[in-house]
Amino acid sequence: MEITLLTSSVAYHVELSIRITGLTAERLIDPNASLPQGLIVTVNVSIQGFMKLENNERAANFTFDVIYNPPIARVTVRGTTYLRGSEEEMKRIDNELKGNKVPAEVAQAVTGTSLAEAIVLCRSIGVPPPLPMILPVQKQQLDYTV
């Protein structure tokens, strides 16, 4: 996929690819047990600093963890994201990446890809996916007297 990195000074057009290297999903409670009330689902995304592979390519490993409280399951997606562009673009990006700051566009692409994989894994083991729950709005009944 091709993305545009918007940095503090200029926009860069680079090719971004994401390769999933590991998927782990484990249900920690009995498959016939009902899910506990008040279940909290948290997502932690960790993208390590970019490494220089070639003059025009950079790579960073990432981990996407779904954490349940109380602990009912473990879901992890691991992979590597690659950035590729012209030498001039990569030199500029290297300057922007100093200090281990990951561009928001890269973090968004990693999160989106990992989330799709995590949803399938969660469905396979029968636990809620890491998506916000939409609760139905209850209408209040008002009593009117005349």
Image (tube, rainbow, N blue to C red):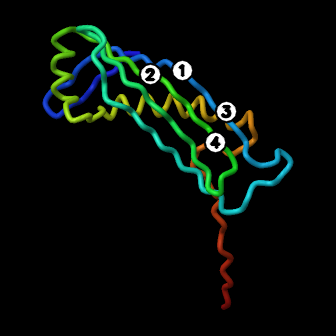
Mark positioned earlier in the residue sequence (2 or 3): 2
Residue 18 falls in image quadrant: top left
Q: Gap between marks 3 and 4, in whole Å?
A: 10 Å
Which amino acid does the dot numbered 2 rest on?
A: Thr
Residue kind at label 3, given as amino acid type = Leu
Compare residues 145 and 7 and report the one nearer the observer. Answer: 7
Q: Position of residue 91 (x, y in %)?
A: 16, 17
Q: Is residue 139 left or right of residue 76?
A: right
- The C terminus lies in which quarter of the figure? bottom right
Q: Examine the image and state in which quarter residue 142 appears.
A: bottom right
Find the distance from the CA under tag 2 to the CA under tag 1: 7 Å
Q: Is residue 145 left or right of residue 59?
A: right
140 up-or-down from 13: above or below? below
Q: CA distance from mark 3 to mark 1?
A: 15 Å
Q: Give the amino acid type for the residue marked by disc 4 in the picture.
A: Arg
Query: Which callout, 3 or 1, points at the residue further toward the start of the chain?
Result: 1
Disc 1 residue type (three-letter): Thr
**Do tag 3 and tag 1 residues touch (Cβ < 8 Å)?**
no
Q: Which residue is mark 2?
A: 80
Q: Secondary structure at mark 2?
A: strand
Image coords of residue 65 (percent x, y): 53, 40
The label on residue 74 is: 4
Q: Secondary structure at mark 4?
A: strand
Q: Counting residues from the N terminus, which is met first, the one under dot 2 or under dot 1?
A: 1
Q: Residues within 10 Å of mark 1 (few under 14, many from 20)?
A: few
Disc ID at residue 121? 3
Report which residue position mark 1 lands on.
Answer: 21
**Is label 3 in contact with label 4 (beta carbons under 8 Å)?**
no
Q: Residue furthest bottom?
A: 146
